[in-house]
């Protein structure tokens, strides 16, 4: 007899004894207390049931959408301009970003194919973006970071190590949604956590109040102009669906997972050949 069936039989039988005045318990309150204890013990022995979904669907993100955000385009290796005074050969988290990426992420459509430059295969995810907050300054974690970053406790490794870098972001334009990793800070600001993590709107700046920078790959996937309006939200890795954003990059969670799987398979194959 299963634990649940035993519990039900016992409770029904004991209820009958109480009704006939034959219970060893002085009151129904004593009986109820004992029954609850027995229930807890019985349920602890019941094997958990696992439900396998028959249809696939994306989990609903707990992070809200930021809507109608002025969005501009930037790229690794970009030279400074009047509206973008900071060169992008380095990022807020990588002093040698161009080298780490593998080269100049040419934004010209003639120099691109399948969302990457034609001259080289990028060593980091070509689907990247920038938001106007940096959780690290002068090698130190900012004091407000543990209080304002929702995933800080889960992602924290050590002081001075960013928990924002490589975070996944969903970016939406019309009926198309692209996924990118947070790789730099801007446009213009690196302190606006009230917008990035809370409910404020982006502050006015030289680019019409832009609150999001996106890479040429994101631009091309969504069909953006140099300046557009998009929506964006943070997403967990498990919420990122298949797409070209999974294909490249030493910083890409999906590339890392594939490499680990390949390494384990190679180790198993090697072990079998030695037997």
Image: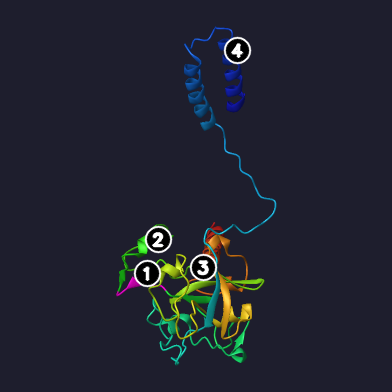
Residue 114 point in image, percent of width and height? 63, 81
Q: Label 4 crowding class (10 Å Cα cut-off): few <14, some 14-19, many 20+?
A: few
The reply to whether the magenta stretch includes residue 78 is no
**How far is the residue under mark 3 from the one under mark 4?**
60 Å
**How far is the residue under mark 3 from the one under mark 2?**
14 Å
Question: With 160 as the anchor, is 253 left or right in this view?
Answer: right
Mark 3 in CB contact with mark 2 (< 8 angstroms): no
Confirm whether residue 126 shows in the render.
no
Q: Label 2 crowding class (10 Å Cα cut-off): few <14, some 14-19, many 20+?
A: some
Q: Secondary structure at mark 3?
A: strand
Name the residue carrying label 4: 16
The part of the chain drawn in magenta is 133-138
Mark 1 in CB contact with mark 2 (< 8 angstroms): yes
- Does label 4 or label 1 sit earlier along the sequence? 4
Q: Secondary structure at mark 2?
A: helix
Above or below 113: residue 169: above
Name of the residue lying farthest toward the right: 54
- Does label 4 or label 2 sit earlier along the sequence? 4
Residue 171 point in image, percent of width and height? 57, 72
Q: Secondary structure at mark 4?
A: helix
Q: Residue at x 61, y 19 (%)?
A: 9
Name the residue carrying label 1: 135
Number of numbered labels in the structure image: 4
The image quadrant of residue 224 is bottom right
Name the residue carrying label 3: 168
The reply to whether the magenta stretch includes residue 137 is yes
The main secondary structure of the magenta stretch is loop
Name the residue carrying label 2: 152
Above or below 98: residue 164: above
**How far is the residue under mark 1 from the one under mark 2?**
10 Å
- Does label 3 or label 2 sit earlier along the sequence? 2
Confirm whether residue 6 shows in the render.
yes
């Amino acid at each position: 007899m299963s634990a649940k069936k035993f519990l039900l039989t016992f409770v029904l039988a004991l209820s009958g004894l109480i009704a006939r005045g034959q219970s060893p318990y002085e009151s129904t309150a004593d009986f109820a207390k004992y029954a609850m204890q027995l229930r807890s013990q019985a349920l602890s022995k019941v094997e958990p049931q696992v439900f396998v979904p028959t249809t696939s669907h994306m989990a609903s993100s707990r992070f809200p959408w930021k809507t109608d955000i002025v969005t501009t385009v930037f790229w690794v290796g970009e030279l400074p301009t009047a509206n973008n005074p900071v060169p992008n050969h380095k990022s807020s988290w990588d002093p040698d970003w161009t080298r780490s990426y593998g080269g100049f992420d040419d934004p010209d459509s003639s120099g691109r194919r399948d969302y990457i430059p034609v001259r080289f295969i990028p060593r980091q995810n070509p689907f990247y973006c920038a938001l106007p907050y940096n959780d690290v300054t002068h090698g130190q974690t900012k004091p407000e970071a543990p209080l304002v970053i929702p995933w800080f406790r889960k992602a924290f490794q050590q002081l001075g190590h960013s928990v924002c870098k490589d975070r996944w972001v969903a970016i939406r334009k019309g009926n198309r949604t692209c996924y990118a990793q947070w790789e730099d800070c801007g446009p213009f600001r690196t302190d606006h956590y009230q917008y990035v993590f809370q409910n404020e709107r982006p502050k006015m700046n030289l680019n019409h109040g832009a609150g999001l920078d996106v890479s040429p790959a994101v631009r091309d996937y969504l069909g953006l102009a140099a300046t557009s309006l998009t929506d964006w939200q943070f997403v967990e890795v498990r919420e990122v669906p298949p797409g070209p954003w999974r294909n490249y990059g030493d910083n890409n969670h999906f590339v890392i997972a594939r490499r680990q799987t390949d390494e384990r398979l190679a180790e198993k194959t090697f072990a079998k050949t030695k037997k």
